[in-house]
Image (cartoon, rainbow, N blue to C red):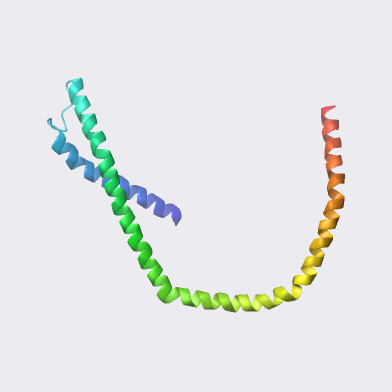
Amino acid sequence: MTKFLLSSLILFITFSVVVKINPVLAQGNTTAPTQIPQTLEEVKIRIQNILSAFPGTLKGTWNYALGVWKRTFVWMKDFWDSSIGPHIVNLWHKIRSFFGKEVEQRKPAVEEEFEREKGELKEEIPKTGKKIWQRLKELIW
């Protein structure tokens, strides 16, 4: 879904830039767009027209897209808050209260098991480190 939204946004921005740049280029150009520039000065003028129109067009397109996304976000947030959100919150509270009791019952046993495992690891780590070092020495020498 995210890829679709990203590709749609890129396509929208590209299309908007193309649509907005064409009239600007046509107004600023002294030669017809189908003619090939004959001199370096004409090439320079065309490039300047394109470069001068691009930042403004991109900014306008970005602001438009940002407005669309903001309105979409506000609409989705309002929809969520008014219809879906309360049901999800209620469900979450029920699940949390159900599993919360079970967690509290098992908490002492889990803490005891954690301390036991931690002690075992403290004993095994130095041995494992020596084994790895021995293997490296054997490989190198």
Count of number-bearing discs: 0
- Quadrant where the image shows the C terminus: top right
Please state which of residues 104 and 33 is positioned toward the viewer in this rendering: 104
Using the image, determine if residue 119 lies above or below residue 18.
below
Q: Position of residue 104 (x, y in %)?
A: 72, 75
Question: Does 1 sit left or right of 120 as displayed?
Answer: left
Q: Position of residue 64 (x, y in %)?
A: 28, 53
- Quadrant where the image shows the N terminus: bottom left
Q: Residue visible at 35% across and 60% down? A: 70
Question: Does 103 sit left or right of 26 as displayed?
Answer: right
Q: Position of residue 50 (x, y in %)?
A: 24, 34
Question: Does 25 sit left or right of 96 as displayed?
Answer: left
Please state which of residues 56 and 5 is positioned toward the viewer in this rendering: 56
Q: Quadrant of residue 132?
A: top right
Q: Residue visible at 69% across and 78% down? A: 101
Residue located farthest toward the top when viewing the structure as drawn:
39
Q: Residue visible at 18% across and 20% down? A: 39
Using the image, determine if residue 99 lies above or below residue 59.
below
Please state which of residues 60 and 35 is positioned toward the viewer in this rendering: 60
Q: Position of residue 12 (x, y in %)?
A: 31, 50
Using the image, determine if residue 12 lies above or below residue 134.
below
Q: Residue visible at 71% across and 76% down? A: 102
